[in-house]
Image (tube, rainbow, N blue to C red):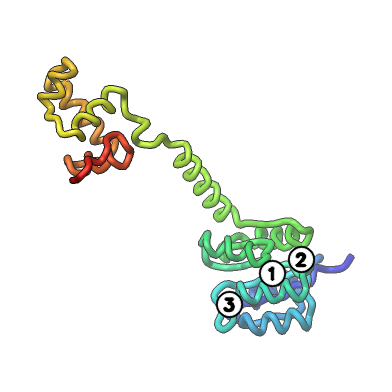
């Protein structure tokens, strides 16, 4: 059975040596070469034609993302696996956009890296569990935000009525009289609606009412 041919691209010599030793212990893998920067990674990949490139992020010279783009353009079948210290979602997204098959953090257990190489070699994708957890948390947060009611929708019918009357310039006493409520009750409605809308003064309240077309802008002659 043919071994998975791996190339290392990382600007730290000791790290490359450590990964090389790790991979040497696997019967189905071999390291066929390495590179110390992005430009060299492109050249070596064209020369060696590896199955998988373990690509660091943040090497000097040509960016790792551009190097990945060039390698994938020249040889689409080559799999790119980012092996990095950055648990950054923006880097992850950019890596996937340029064609990487996986994203592994350098502080991951050795067997996660080995599993990642095998997964991307089979045509799958691999994310370090910590990155996957971050993405799930972010997704949940967006879902909650999407399901959150607009602030105006949280107002009761009476609070909306009081809002309109306040914005039109009526005092609390006048509103209480018109609605046949106590001043204390109207004050409570005013407090609740301003809290819900995060409004702190009369000017903001009037501006909000105009924006929401609760009241019309008076004609200026």
Q: Earlier in the sequence, mark 3 or mark 2?
A: 2
Residue 152 in the image: x percent, y percent?
A: 34, 34
Question: Can residue 165 be seen by looking at this rendering?
Answer: yes
Residue underneath mark 1 = 22
**Position of 49 relative to 85 (above/below):** below
- Measure the alpha-carbon separation of dots 3 and 1: 26 Å
Residues at marks 1 and 2 touching, judged by CB atoms closer than 8 Å:
yes
User: Residue sitting at 33 percent across and 38 percent down?
Assistant: 212
Kindly give the residue lying farthest to the top in the view shown: 180
Q: Residue at label 2? A: 26
Question: How many C-alpha atoms fall within 10 Å of the one at disc 1: few (<14), some, or many (≥20)?
Answer: some
Give the camera-side residue of 67 and 83. Answer: 67
Query: For the residues carrying marks 3 and 2, which lies nearer the camera in this image?
Result: 3
Residue shown at the point (79%, 58%) measured from the top left: 122
Q: Indicate the quadrant where residue 66 lies.
A: bottom right
Horizontally, residue 201 falls left or right of residue 60, namely: left
Mark 3 touching mark 1, by CB under 8 A?
A: no
Instruction: Using the rendered view, name the quadrant where residue 172 is placed.
Output: top left
Q: CA distance from mark 1 to mark 2?
A: 8 Å
Could you tell which of marks 3 and 1 lies nearer the N-terminus? Answer: 1
Which residue carries the number 3 mark?
Answer: 63
């Amino acid at each position: 059975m043919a071994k998975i041919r791996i190339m290392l691209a990382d600007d730290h010599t000791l790290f490359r040596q450590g990964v090389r030793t790790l991979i040497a212990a696997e019967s189905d893998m071999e390291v066929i070469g390495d590179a110390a920067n992005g430009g060299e990674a492109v050249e070596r990949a064209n020369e060696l034609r590896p199955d998988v490139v373990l690509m660091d992020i943040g090497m000097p010279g040509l960016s790792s993302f551009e190097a990945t783009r060039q390698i994938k353009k020249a040889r689409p079948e080559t799999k790119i696996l980012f092996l990095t210290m950055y648990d950054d979602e923006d880097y992850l997204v950019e890596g996937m956009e340029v064609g990487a098959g996986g994203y592994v953090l350098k502080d991951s257990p050795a067997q996660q890296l080995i599993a990642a190489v095998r997964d991307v070699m089979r045509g799958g994708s691999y994310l370090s569990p910590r990155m996957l957890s971050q993405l799930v948390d972010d997704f949940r947060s967006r879902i909650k935000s999407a399901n959150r009611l607009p602030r105006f929708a949280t107002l009761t019918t009476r609070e909306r009525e009081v809002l309109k009357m306040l914005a039109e310039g009526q005092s609390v006493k006048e509103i209480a009289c018109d609605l046949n409520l106590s001043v204390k009750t109207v004050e409570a409605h005013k407090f609740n609606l301003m809290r819900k809308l995060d409004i702190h003064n009369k000017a903001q309240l009037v501006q909000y009412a105009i924006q929401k077309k609760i009241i019309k802008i008076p004609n200026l002659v």
